[in-house]
Image (cartoon, rainbow, N blue to C red):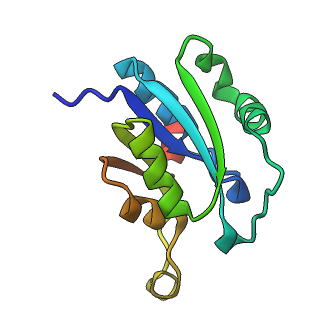
Amino acid sequence: MFQPRAILLPIDLDTDGFEALSFAVAFAKQFDAALHFFFVNNPHAGYRHPSLSVEELKERIEAQPVAGSLADMRVQYSVTRGDLGDETHRYCRENEIDLLITSHERHSRLYTSLLDTRDEEIIESVDVPVLVMPKRLLELLES
């Protein structure tokens, strides 16, 4: 049976991307896995958060309703700069990530033919299992 020891949850601050946070916390607790929160300040997105520090990322996550559940967990926060796919791949390799969790919002065919979404870029870049949670399902789980 697959037992992840280290789970990565990339955070998207441009969309207030905490949709999968509650799910990732519960999932990591179920397996007693370390949970890694990771933000990439991407040049393709115009470095929208140029001065974001690890402490600021931690504060934003701890401001979420599920933050109280993090107290008894092994948690790692990381902020880096560069290409989203390359940095995610590097982080997974260097930190022995077993599983990546991301949310996904369905877009029209026209949209996806013109633009890669953040989640697609991440999925295509890593060599670890990826658990993709549809945003609609995450919304149902939250209610």
Relative to 130, residue 68 above or below: above
Task: Indicate left or right for 3 with 44 as reference.
Answer: left
Counting labels gives 0
Residue at 79% x, 37% y: name it: 56
Relative to 131, residue 3 above or below: above
Q: Residue furthest left?
A: 1
Q: Residue furthest right?
A: 51
Residue at 63% x, 26% y: name it: 66
Residue 112 placement (x, y as % from top left): 47, 81
Residue at 60% x, 20% y: name it: 70
Q: Residue furthest top?
A: 72
Q: Which of the 4 image quarters holds residue 50? A: bottom right
Residue 28 placement (x, y as % from top left): 43, 26
The foreground one among 20 and 9 is 9
Residue 56 visible in the displayed image: yes
Point out the image quarter for the N terminus.
top left
Residue 42 placement (x, y as % from top left): 65, 64
Q: Which of the 4 image quarters holds residue 63? A: top right
Relative to 105, residue 59 above or below: above
Residue 58 placement (x, y as % from top left): 72, 32
Point out the image quarter for the C terminus.
top right
Relative to 69, residue 56 above or below: below
Q: Which of the 4 image quarters holds residue 109? A: bottom left
Task: Indicate left or right for 98 with 78 as reference.
Answer: left
Residue at 62% x, 62% y: name it: 82
Residue 137 visible in the displayed image: no
